[in-house]
Amino acid sequence: MATIAEYIWVDGTHPTALVRSKTKIMPETLEAPDLSDFPLWAFDGSSTNQAPGGDSDRILKPVCMVADPVRGKGAWLVMCEVFEPDGTTAHKSNKRAVLREVMAKAAAQEPWIAFEQEYTFFDGSKPLGFPAERRYPAPQGPYYCGVGADEVYGREVVEEHMKVCLEAGIHLTGINAEVMPGQWEFQCGGPGVDPLTASDHLWLARWLLYRVGEDYGISATLDPKPVPGDWNGAGMHTNYSTAPMRTTGGRGVIEAACEALGTRREEHLAVYGWGNEGRLTGAHETCSYKDFKYGIADRTASIRIPRMVAEVGYGYLEDRRPAANADPYDVCTVLLKTTLGLW
Ligand code: MG
């Protein structure tokens, strides 16, 4: 038996980066490998918007690994950062490297992150569960957390995705059907999960979602507004706390963080996902991208402070603005920089 490693990385596509992967087969069988067992590996950056054709080799450096439940025993999923040919200079598309540097300054604050990743299944050119061309299902209302073949679509893929994420050891904390038919959510990260790990696991979970979808002939999109009109968009609400927010007096720290976030609206929206203006309209449980407000238990705010947090006096905040297609490394970077004064 060999060892099979799927090297996974984020590419340089604009305006929304794509996730890519290729398979490395190592002849030896590694029973309990660690990251150092997986070598640097080159790829063709000219095919991923990461290099010109005349000088196309770019370098993959393994940074996070989990078991590969799709291939099973002896197989691993290996998240990588992209470097220039010298192997030490981070490629400009490598947003994880930026977050690493910010985390070096922020780690003492013990930040935790949990993402709520929404997504929409597509069957060909229409959302799963939508009837044939130019027709629409019954209006929104029964679909969120619904049950029954007339209300939810794609559960078999969702269940399989949950199963492989858990087998891989990804920090998954829940799933639910969303407001629009064919729309779902999974939650990734949570208490004790630092921003780098939460983001690595989110990219791995996205990769697994696409990979599982292949077996069902169903694609998943992270488009923030996959259907125009009176249909919910897809977001990536980001729950965030630091140690001072989680202890007595934390509510004051959370409110100070909200005030700081209000002064950096532009910097945040710039990395919260392409096409997010179509989603942050002020309707459908959002605050307009043109405004900023925070509030307790307020789902029309940019930042929500959960009711329970306000009552006990400490906890976390929820930034409701990131779109489903935002890069989690970017989102964590600006949250840390703004709330910890690291710009
Ligand atoms: Mg949701």
Image (cartoon, helix red, strand yellow):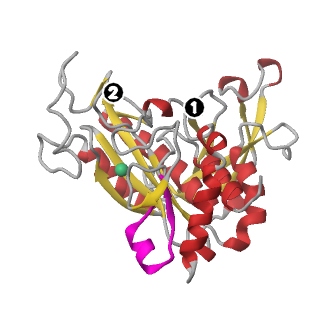
| Depth order, front residue of 39/229 | 229
Residue 152 on the magenta segment: no
The local crowd at label 1, few if under 14, some if 14 to 19, many if 20 or more residues have their Cα within 10 Å, is some
| Depth order, front residue of 123/239 | 239
**Which stretch appears magenta?**
303-319
Q: Give the quarter of the image for residue 281.
A: top left
Residue 248 location, x and y as percent? 55, 83
Q: Is residue 148 left or right of residue 32?
A: left
Disc sitting over residue 16 in the figure:
1
Question: Looking at the image, which residue is at 32% across and 45% down?
Answer: 184
**Label 1 near label 2: C-beta < 8 Å?**
no
The local crowd at label 2, few if under 14, some if 14 to 19, many if 20 or more residues have their Cα within 10 Å, is some
Disc sitting over residue 168 in the figure:
none
Mark earlier in primary sequence (2, 1):
1
| Depth order, front residue of 93/137 | 137
Residue 309 on the magenta segment: yes
Question: Looking at the image, which residue is at 16% across and 45% down?
Answer: 142
Residue 337 location, x and y as percent? 71, 55
**Quarter placement of the N terminus:** bottom right
For marks 2 and 1, give the CA distance. 18 Å
Q: Amino acid at mark 2?
A: Val
Residue furthest top as drawn? 134
Q: Is residue 339 left or right of residue 286?
A: right
Q: Amino acid at mark 1?
A: Thr
| Secondary element at tag 2 | loop
Query: Which residue corresponds to mark 2?
Result: 227
